[in-house]
Image (cartoon, rainbow, N blue to C red):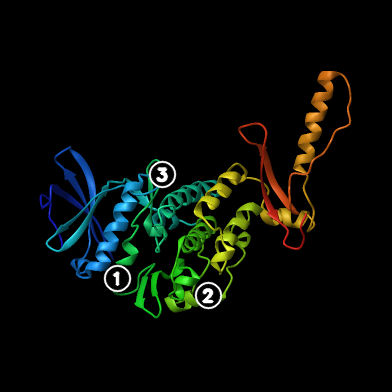
């Protein structure tokens, strides 16, 4: 279904076609009631044939629209035009993350910035029990002011496979007991198996995207969707430091944590993921992962807290003109390498980024 300029969908007047995809057509439109330009995504008429499924989608889309989070696409209205459902949303200016990635890996700082925004948007949705199910670079939009917006919450339930080979084909077919649904390169293992998914599935997809932003390569590859899904189930991705040697140990740990095969091994919430990203955001330009691994023996505890205590004791002694014996308190609870540390805004706590040694504990 194609609409020419001037066509009305409810109160909205079509201005121009913006793009066509597997889930319908996107138009620039105008709301003459308030003089605002909006985006309208017109879905295939077949979407509304299954009323139960369509009603669930409507409920989820409305819930996502009510979140009003800066990293989620704002949905204004849902409508129906001659049996074709449409979604009215804010009009964005910019490009998708997929467009950004065509030139290769992003800088570490930009990758972390985008990752934090995506994690914060996911956290807001997950806290309302909304799972995306098809998170991929095509569904992440970067505005001209570098704001990342997550698109198409709820549409994964309605998606249909496109004809022919696409860059990131969406897979959909009925299985027992569940449904295989998602984009092959970014699916979680539980999606591949057709199991019920929860927020942790989105975290795995996030990990695949973060890996690609940092390295310019996808963590799981193959000549077909079947081969890619087999890799997701059975293979571990190459160590990201091989493709992105400038990342810190903390970043490498976060990527690996997101890509654990079992949901129980991943971050248990996007809020925890966002917190870890915020914690290390000031240390993305520190010593590369492989350099630190070569110089630091396994099990060595880097005593950032000792340095801080010594400095405080030194200046304290100068002020009182009396040298006192410094006291040292260990702040870490496990062994590993600390790639950076700083005082929190309250001046009382220390925030540090660490890569824990799996062979020992403190």
What's the mark number on residue 147? 3
Residue 297 point in image, percent of width and height: 80, 57
The number of numbered badges drawn on the structure is 3
Residue 347 visible from this viewpoint:
yes
**How far apart in space, not on screen, are marks 2 and 1 (Cα)?**
23 Å
Residue at x 20%, y 60% (from the top left corner): 85
Look at mark 2 in the image and give the residue it sits on.
233
Residue at x 47%, y 62% (from the top left corner): 205
**How far apart in space, not on screen, are marks 2 and 3 (Cα)?**
33 Å
Q: Nearer the viewer, residue 140 or 86?
A: 86
What's the mark number on residue 160? 1
Q: Are marks 1 and 3 in contact (CB under 8 Å)?
A: no
The secondary structure type at the circle numbered 3 is loop
What's the mark number on residue 69? none
**Local crowd size for mark 2, using a 10 Å CA cut-off: few (<14), some (14–19), many (≥20):** some
Task: Indicate the quadrant containing the N terminus: top left, top right, bottom left or bottom right.
Answer: bottom left
The secondary structure type at the circle numbered 2 is helix
Mark nearer the N terminus (2 vs 3): 3
Foreground mark, 1 or 3, reads: 1
**Local crowd size for mark 1, using a 10 Å CA cut-off: few (<14), some (14–19), many (≥20):** some
Mark nearer the N terminus (1 vs 3): 3
The secondary structure type at the circle numbered 1 is loop
Residue at x 59%, y 61% (from the top left corner): 256
Residue 247 visible from this viewpoint:
no
Residue 303 point in image, percent of width and height: 78, 44
Foreground mark, 2 or 3, reads: 2
**How far apart in space, not on screen, are marks 1 and 3 (Cα)?**
29 Å
Residue 198 lies left or right of residue 34; in this view the side is right
In the image, residue 279 above or below residue 83: above
């Amino acid at each position: 279904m194609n609409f020419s300029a001037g066509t009305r969908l409810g109160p909205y007047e079509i201005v121009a076609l913006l793009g066509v995809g597997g889930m319908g057509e996107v138009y620039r439109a105008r709301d003459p009631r308030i003089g605002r330009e909006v985006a309208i995504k017109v879905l295939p008429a077949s979407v509304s044939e299954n009323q139960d499924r369509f009603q669930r989608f409507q409920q989820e889309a409305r819930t996502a629209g009510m979140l009003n989070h800066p990293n989620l696409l704002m949905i204004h209205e849902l409508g129906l035009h001659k049996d074709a459902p449409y979604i009215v949303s804010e009009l964005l200016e910019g490009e998708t993350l997929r467009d950004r990635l065509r030139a290769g890996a992003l800088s570490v700082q930009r990758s972390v910035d985008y990752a934090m925004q995506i994690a914060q948007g996911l956290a807001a949705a997950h806290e309302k029990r909304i799972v995306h199910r098809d998170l991929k670079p095509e569904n992440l939009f970067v505005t001209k002011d570098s704001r990342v917006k997550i698109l198409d919450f709820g549409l994964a339930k309605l998606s249909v496979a496109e004809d022919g080979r696409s860059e990131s084909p969406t897979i959909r077919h009925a299985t027992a007991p569940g449904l295989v649904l998602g984009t092959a390169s970014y699916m979680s293992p539980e999606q591949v198996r057709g199991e019920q998914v929860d927020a942790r599935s989105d975290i795995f997809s996030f990990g695949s995207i973060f890996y690609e932003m940092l390295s310019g390569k996808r963590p799981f590859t193959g000549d077909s969707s079947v081969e890619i899904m087999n890799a997701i189930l059975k293979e571990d991705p190459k160590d990201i430091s091989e493709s992105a040697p400038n990342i810190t140990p903390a970043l490498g740990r976060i990527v690996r944590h997101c890509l654990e095969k079992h949901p129980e091994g991943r971050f248990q919430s996007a809020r925890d993921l966002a917190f870890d990203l915020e914690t290390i955001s000031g240390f993305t330009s520190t010593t590369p992962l492989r350099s630190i691994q070569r110089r630091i023996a396994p099990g060595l505890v880097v005593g950032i807290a000792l340095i801080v205590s010594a400095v405080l004791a030194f200046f304290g002694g100068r002020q009182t003109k009396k040298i006192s014996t410094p006291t040292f308190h260990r702040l870490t609870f496990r062994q590993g390498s600390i790639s950076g540390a700083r005082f929190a805004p309250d001046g009382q706590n220390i925030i540090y980024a660490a890569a824990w040694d799996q062979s020992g504990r403190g």
